């Protein structure tokens, strides 16, 4: 499935830009990647990409048919130079794998090298253990300071998990989940089997207050995410690296999907509170883009064009009324700066991406 086409469905429905992940080396050829990029920008209107390399190395003497991340970054740069007024400029980021840093102690160097290629942000893997992430952020900040480089933002990823099946998939994706963390999450299963009526009837012998209902595995995973974010913020406060959030939904189960929404709001507030300055969330009504099932494909496309027109008018009004502020037509959280400082993307794979 083409990630650009799939992301366009979310972009049209939500009224928010998407961060499109693209594995560059697996393209059929460099020319195929260029054609894909041109269609992604011109036809689907995407302007934010996360460029990733191949999942594993090939045997000696073999090469992937598509471009490397460095070559793809160069192609995006040339695309911006050749873009017309009707074609949006594109931006890209890369992944940051903290576990690889613990093993090889050079992920911070990879990040600085990718900044040289034009990377504007980094997205971490899902965090279930903070040790590797804290080490990477501190080393990355120190290296940027030593070289006189302004560090690019790192988006910390968190993933709700309420089932062993979801946990198996999380591990398959490459996230590191310590055994004690998994045990903590799923230890909630046995306690949550107590019925709500029994939990409500349980009375504390001293205070005579009703005991709190037991948590479920997905709730426990969200609680763990809050603790992990707090620990990371406290342990990297002086490293100079700007941080943002990425909360992903990796399953189709309703409770885990709902937990993604709740966890994003909770972690966003936690991160903003940690900055120590007043903040607020700005919002506006997103026009309805896609109609009902009876709409034809043509009508749906016309709806999307009308939406883009409205968004353009909205952005122009924002510029006139707010100087250089540009909220990009997305939900934003402001901490005293401009709306451009904080962008929220709806990720094509589900979940939320916030540059705080």
Image (spheres, helix red, strand yellow):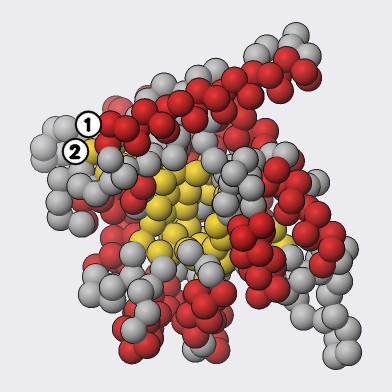
Residue 161 lies, in percent from the top left, at 53, 49
Find the residue positioned furthest to the left: 207
Q: Position of residue 152 (x, y in %)?
A: 41, 68
Q: Which residue is mark 1?
A: 210
Horizontal side of 52 relative to 16 (left or right) equals: right
Q: Quadrant of residue 316?
A: top left
- Residue ID at (60%, 35%): 11
Q: Is residue 290 above or below residue 317?
A: above
Query: Relative to the observer, which residue lies in front, 36 or 8?
Result: 36
Mark 2 element type:
loop
The residue at the point 54 percent across, 41 percent down is: 17
Picture coordinates of residue 271, whole percent (x, y): 28, 53
Q: What residue did someone put label 2 on?
A: 204
Secondary element at image label 1: loop
Among the two numbered marks 1 and 2 on one chain, the one whose residue lies closer to the N terminus: 2
Q: Residue sitting at 53 percent across and 81 percent down?
A: 113
């Amino acid at each position: 499935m083409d990630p650009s086409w799939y992301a366009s469905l979310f972009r049209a429905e939500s009224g928010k830009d998407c961060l499109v992940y693209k594995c560059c080396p697996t393209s059929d050829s460099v020319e195929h990647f260029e054609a894909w990029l041109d269609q992604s920008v011109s036809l689907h209107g995407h302007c934010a990409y996360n460029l990733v390399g191949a999942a594993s190395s090939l045997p000696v003497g073999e090469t992937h048919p598509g471009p490397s991340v460095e070559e793809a970054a160069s192609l995006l740069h040339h695309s911006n130079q050749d873009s017309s007024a009707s074609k949006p400029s594109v931006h890209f980021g890369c992944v940051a794998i903290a576990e690889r840093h613990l093993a090889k102690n050079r992920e911070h160097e990879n990040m600085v090298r990718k900044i040289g290629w034009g990377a504007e942000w980094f997205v971490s893997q899902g965090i279930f253990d903070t040790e590797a992430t804290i080490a990477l952020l501190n080393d990355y900040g120190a290296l940027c300071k030593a070289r006189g480089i302004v560090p690019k933002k790192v988006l910390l990823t968190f993933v709700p998990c309420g089932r062993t099946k979801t946990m198996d998939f999380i591990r398959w994706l490459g996230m590191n989940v310590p055994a004690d963390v998994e045990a903590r999450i799923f230890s909630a299963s046995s306690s949550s089997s107590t019925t709500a009526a029994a939990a409500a009837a349980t009375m504390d012998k001293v205070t005579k207050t009703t005991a709190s209902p037991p948590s479920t595995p997905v709730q426990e995973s969200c609680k763990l995410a809050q603790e992990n974010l707090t620990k990371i913020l406290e342990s990297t406060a002086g490293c100079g690296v700007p941080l943002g959030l990425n909360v992903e939904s990796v399953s189709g189960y309703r409770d885990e999907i709902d937990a993604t929404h709740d966890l994003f709001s909770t972690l966003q507030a936690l991160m903003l509170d940690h900055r120590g300055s007043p903040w607020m969330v700005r919002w506006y009504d997103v026009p309805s883009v896609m109609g009902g099932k009876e709409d034809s494909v043509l009508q749906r496309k016309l709806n999307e064009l009308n939406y883009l027109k409205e968004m353009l008018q909205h952005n122009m009004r924002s510029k006139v009324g707010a100087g250089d502020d540009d909220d990009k037509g997305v939900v934003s959280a402001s901490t005293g700066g401009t709306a451009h400082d904080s962008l929220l993307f709806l990720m094509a794979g589900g979940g939320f991406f916030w540059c705080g």
